Image (cartoon, rainbow, N blue to C red):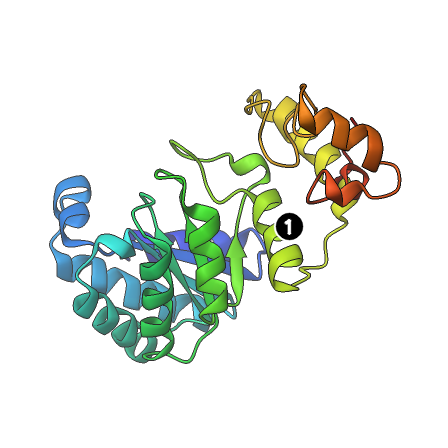
Amino acid sequence: MPLYVDDVKRAVDCGVDGIVIEIPCSKHLVEHSYRWPMEKAIDLSIKATRFANEQGLYTSFFTIDATRADMDWYLNLIERVAKEGYMDALTLVDTFGVLSPQSAAYYTKAVKGRISKPLEIHFHADFGLAVANTIMAVLAGAEVIHSTVTGIGERAGNTPMEETVLALLTMYGIDVGLKYDKLNELSQLVRELSNTVIPANRPFIGDMAYDIESGIVSGWCKNNFNQHPTEVFPVHPNFVGHRAP
């Protein structure tokens, strides 16, 4: 049995009802990092996804480094796996955070044009664009967002949940259904458990995100905050569970 099929068997033995099948899908990553011929990666993906479906598992096909793969090859790959293997959902993965917002929308539309499966978005923040890219992908038709609390993850991290959900809510009217007043409490818990720190001025959850330093803004805060808080801040600190200034 290929390695990926053995992984599916272990998942079934653990009693899970869903699984993510990951494949490296850029030629350079497959050949240099995995040292596989491309056909092996394709063959393993087809066999593993088909076997997962036969075991009754909800199967998400997770395409590592998709955004650095040749696009035509990538689109043909996902179509082939959908037909010869199986997928309940597809995850478009920007493993190294190289998308621009415009290309995030373009990729999403191109994928949606080739397969009729729910599209999940898994973006990284190496160039600081994960939030913008994720939002553009959602507006272009993606249904599921992969994000992490405080943006923890490999290297520069994954799409930060807090900034993403609040931008969707306040700028686009998309409510993902979270208890937003728990964001700071959750952020603090994750920081403690993961032994990580975030910049003090991180939007919404940074320790100084609602601090006023001096000058004209201090006057705004004194005159406006109690009755007109959004004259001073775009989101009220209470709404995200942050202390007031």
Residue closer to the observer: 207 or 160 = 207
Image coords of residue 83 (percent x, y)? 31, 80
Identify the residue shown where x is 70% and y is 24%.
212
Q: Tell which of 98 and 118 is nearer to you.
A: 98
State the residue at coordinates (67%, 19%).
Answer: 213
Q: Residue at x 76, y 27 (%)?
A: 219
Is 150 located above or below residue 245 in the figure?
below
Q: Residue furthest right?
A: 227
Q: Position of residue 77 (x, y in %)?
A: 23, 69
Q: State whether residue 197 appears in this view.
A: yes
Residue closest to the eye, 123 or 230: 230
- Image vertical order of residue 147 relative to residue 138, above or below: above
Image coordinates of residue 72 in percent, x first then y, are 18, 70
Q: Tally the numbered discs.
A: 1
Residue 176 falls in which quadrant of the image? bottom right
Q: Amino acid at mark 1?
A: Leu
Residue at 34% x, 80% y is: 113
- Quadrant of res 110: bottom left
**Can you see residue 9?**
no
In the rendering, at what x and y percent does residue 31 appear?
12, 47
> In the drawing, does residue 27 fall left or right of residue 80?
left
Q: Quadrant of the C terminus?
A: top right
Element type where label 1 sits in the image: helix
Which residue is denoted by mark 1 in the rendering? 166
Q: Image quadrant for the N terminus?
A: bottom left
Asked if residue 34 lies left or right of residue 142, the reply is left
Does 86 sit above or below residue 44?
Answer: below
How packed mark 1 is, by other alpha carbons closer than 10 Å (few <14, some 14-19, many 20 or more), is many
Please state which of residues 34 and 73 is positioned toward the viewer in this rendering. Answer: 73
**Vertical arrangement, residue 200 with respect to residue 163, above or below:** above
